Every structure is written in C-alpha cells, then in structure tokens.
C-alpha cells in the first residue's frame, strides 16, 4: 500500500521548531501567517502578553472589496500592505516574521513583500 505524506503535519513540526526560537516582544512583535486554500490571514502578536495587536485577512470586508478579481498572490500582497498600515498606525515599525512552517514562496512571500512595502522592517 502507498503511504501518503501528510504535508500539513510536516509543516506543523517546522512551525513548532521555529516557534521555540522566535518570540514576539512589545518592541518587536511577531507577524504570524496562516494560509488556506483560498484565504490568507496574518496577525501581529505580542507573545510576552499573549495578545494580538493587529490582524488582517482576505476575509476582512474592506480588503475583500479591493481584491475582487485578483489572483491569490496579488491578494496576499494587498493583505501584507493592509497589516503594515494598521501596525504603523499603532506605532509598530519593526517585527519578526513567522511563516508558520510554510515555504517562503508564493503567497507567503507576496504577503511579506507587501508588508515591507507598507513600511514594516524585518
């Protein structure tokens, strides 16, 4: 019988390994990314307090209107810019990027590029 590789389980192992080393602080919070088949979500987290400071996703009403008819990568770029704008409004300029075990390519890279273009430093 053929054994199918569970890619999501492998991703979760990578995410846990990275999370043991990467922590967000009040001065430099963590930008966490979660991606599904059709959507992408990100949030800026202060791990010392355990709170989410800023979040954005393709499901937000104002973002969903602007991504109508765009590709997934273009949508991820717009979400990255939106989270950067919201973070800068809260006084956050420098972050730690947590890709949550996802490969740094495609939509994850587009979101990171959008956040950098929006003014975040990482």
Image (cartoon, rainbow, N blue to C red):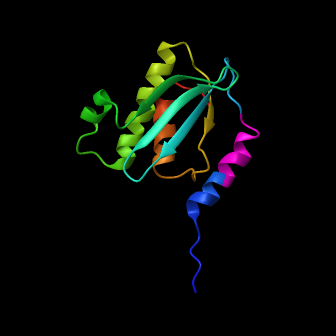
Work out whether 93 lies above or below 31: above
User: Quadrant location of the C terminus?
Assistant: top right
With 48 as the anchor, is 40 left or right in this view? left
Please report the bounds of the magenta region as a residue range: 13-22
Our reading of the magenta stretch's main secondary structure is helix
User: Residue 96 in the image: x percent, y percent?
Assistant: 64, 31
Q: Is residue 57 above or below residue 1?
A: above
User: Taking 86 as reference, is 122 left or right?
Assistant: right
- Residue at 49 percent across and 35 percent down: it is 42
Q: Residue 69 vs residue 92: left or right? A: left
Residue 79, horizontal then vertical, whole percent: 41, 34
Magenta stretch contains residue 18: yes
Residue 49 x, y percent position in the rendering: 67, 20
Q: Quadrant of residue 11?
A: bottom right
State the count of labels: 0
Quadrant hosting residue 59: top left
Can residue 98 be seen here? The reply is: yes
Image quadrant where residue 4 sits: bottom right
In this rendering, would 14 be left or right of 79?
A: right
Residue drawn at x 64%, y 59% as measured from the top left: 10
| Residue ID at (50%, 23%) | 54
Q: Position of residue 83 (x, y in %)?
A: 46, 27
Front-lying residue, 101 or 95: 101
Q: Residue furthest bottom?
A: 1
The residue at 62%/23% (across/down) is 94
Q: Does the image show residue 118?
A: no
Q: Quadrant of the N terminus?
A: bottom right
The magenta stretch spans residue 8: no
Residue found at the far right of this picture: 21
């Amino acid at each position: 019988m053929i054994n199918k590789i569970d890619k999501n389980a492998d991703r979760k192992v990578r995410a846990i390994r990275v999370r043991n080393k990467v922590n967000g602080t009040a001065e430099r919070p963590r930008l966490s990314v979660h991606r599904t088949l059709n959507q992408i979500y990100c949030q800026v987290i202060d791990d010392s307090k355990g709170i989410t400071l800023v979040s954005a996703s393709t499901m937000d009403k104002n973002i969903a209107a602007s991504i109508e008819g765009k590709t997934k990568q273009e949508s991820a770029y717009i979400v990255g810019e939106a989270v950067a704008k919201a973070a800068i409004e809260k006084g956050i300029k420098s972050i730690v990027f947590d890709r949550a075990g996802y490969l740094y390519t495609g939509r994850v890279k587009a979101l990171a590029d959008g956040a950098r273009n929006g003014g975040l430093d990482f």
